[in-house]
Image (cartoon, helix red, strand yellow):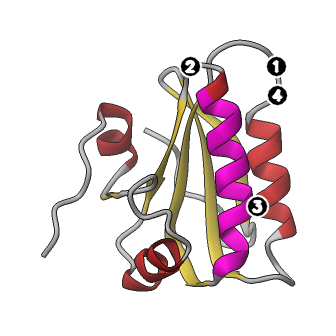
Amino acid sequence: MCAHPDPREPFRTPELFDECRMVQARGELDPTTVAPLVQSLEDARTGRGRVFLIVDFREVTFADGSILGPLCEAWEDCRARQGWVRVVHSSLGIDLVLLGGGMLGRFPAYATAQDAWRGTPATAG
């Protein structure tokens, strides 16, 4: 299991989780603060071959549509390499951003990194 992130670091990049890379974000994600997430997602996709990427938003307190572009870019890249991107969160706000951007079907919520690795989405409720 991944170590608990240092609260002084807004992002942890990329961390190996089994055969998967993981990016963890915290705090607010908006146009003025999304750049480290963009860089972390790019760093996680360096190299060749298949990429499985878990993006952990459980410690994000606010997100807006600025997360959509970087997530979609990562999804397209990983998919072209026979991989995937899965998002871990339990936030109605993130669900609404994804829904508003037409991306909720592409990025269903996963409760934990382990669930994302196994492909078991969180249940509604």
Q: CA distance from mark 4 to mark 2?
A: 15 Å
| Secondary structure beneath label 2 | loop
Res 33 → quadrant: bottom right
Within 10 Å of disc 1 (Cα), the crowding (few <14, some 14-19, many 20+) is: few
The mark found on residue 47 in the picture is 1
> Which label's residue is closer to the chain start, 2 or 1?
1
Amino acid type, residue under disc 2 in the picture: Gln
**What separation in Å lies between label 1 and label 4 (alpha carbons)?**
4 Å
The reply to whether callout 2 and callout 3 are in contact (CB within 8 Å) is: no
- How far is disc 2 from disc 3 in space, using C-alphas? 22 Å
Q: Earlier in the sequence, mark 4 or mark 2?
A: 4
Please give the label number shown on residue 60.
none
Asked if the residues shown at circle 2 and circle 1 are in contact, with their CB atoms under 8 angstroms apart, the answer is no
- Residue 46 is marked as 4
17 is higher (above) or lower (below) than 47: below
Residue carrying label 2: 82
Residue receiving disc 3:
37
The three-letter code of the residue at mark 3 reads: Leu
